[in-house]
Image (cartoon, rainbow, N blue to C red):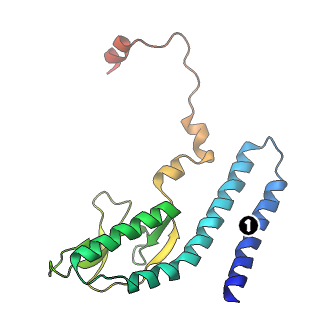
């Protein structure tokens, strides 16, 4: 019963967004892209909500007593989340993170860590020998925001006038 009502809620969200897309004139590229982005966002949010309990149950039942098991489980988790367009939310920083395994104080047992995805040094935010609940969110990358339709006008340059530069001319520009 609960699964049926969850499915119904997701279907209604998509229908609502798709109905809005039918109102967009065929040639209105920016509006259509915005609506498509809304569909993708709604889908990934629903996916995160539905997948979170299943993932946490799977992780709790998987072996994770040793450092090697923690690292393997972390790598598998990160790969699955990435393939689904999801990420782990660090509740402390409210930023997206990935799961890692680290030796810590006991190299045989190891520990789990959350590391911030956007941080070049992969800042640790949560560390525990025991597995903790993972909160999932749609993955939003800097790259995806750079490629959004709203940023296109700033990134598109007018065509160059004249013949293309030769490789030698390009070297002299440096």
Q: Position of residue 63 (x, y in %)?
A: 32, 82
* Residue at (74% x, 49% y) in the render: 31
Left or right? Give the position of 90 relative to 112.
right
Residue matched to label 1: 14
* Residue at (80% x, 40% y) in the render: 27
Looking at the rendered structure, the secondary structure element under dot 1 is helix
* Residue at (52% x, 63% y) in the render: 84
Q: Position of residue 75 (x, y in %)?
A: 34, 67
Vertical position of residue 151 compared to residue 64: above or below = above
> Which of the image's four quarters has the C terminus?
top left
Q: Which picture quadrant has residue 126?
A: bottom left
Seen as rendered, the residue at the extreme bottom is 1
19 or 162, which lies in front? 19
27 or 56, which lies in front? 56
22 or 154, which lies in front? 22
Left or right? Give the position of 102 relative to 57.
left
Q: How many marks?
A: 1
Vertical position of residue 160 compared to residue 74: above or below = above
């Amino acid at each position: 019963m609960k699964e049926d009502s969850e499915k119904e809620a997701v279907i209604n969200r998509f229908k609502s967004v798709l109905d809005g897309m039918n109102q967009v004139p065929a040639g209105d590229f920016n509006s259509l892209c915005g609506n498509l982005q809304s569909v993708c966002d709604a889908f990934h949010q629903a996916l995160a909500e539905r997948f979170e309990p299943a993932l946490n149950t799977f992780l709790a039942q998987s072996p994770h007593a040793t450092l090697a098991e923690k690292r393997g489980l972390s790598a598998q988790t990160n790969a699955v989340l990435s393939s689904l367009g999801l990420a782990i939310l660090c509740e402390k920083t409210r930023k997206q993170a990935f799961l890692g395994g680290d030796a810590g104080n006991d190299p045989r047992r190891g520990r789990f860590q959350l590391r911030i995805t956007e941080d070049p040094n992969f800042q640790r935010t949560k560390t525990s020998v025991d597995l903790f609940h993972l909160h999932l969110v749609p993955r939003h990358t800097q790259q995806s925001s750079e490629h959004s339709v709203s940023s296109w006008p700033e990134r598109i340059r007018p065509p160059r006038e004249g013949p293309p530069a030769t490789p030698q001319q390009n070297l002299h520009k440096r």
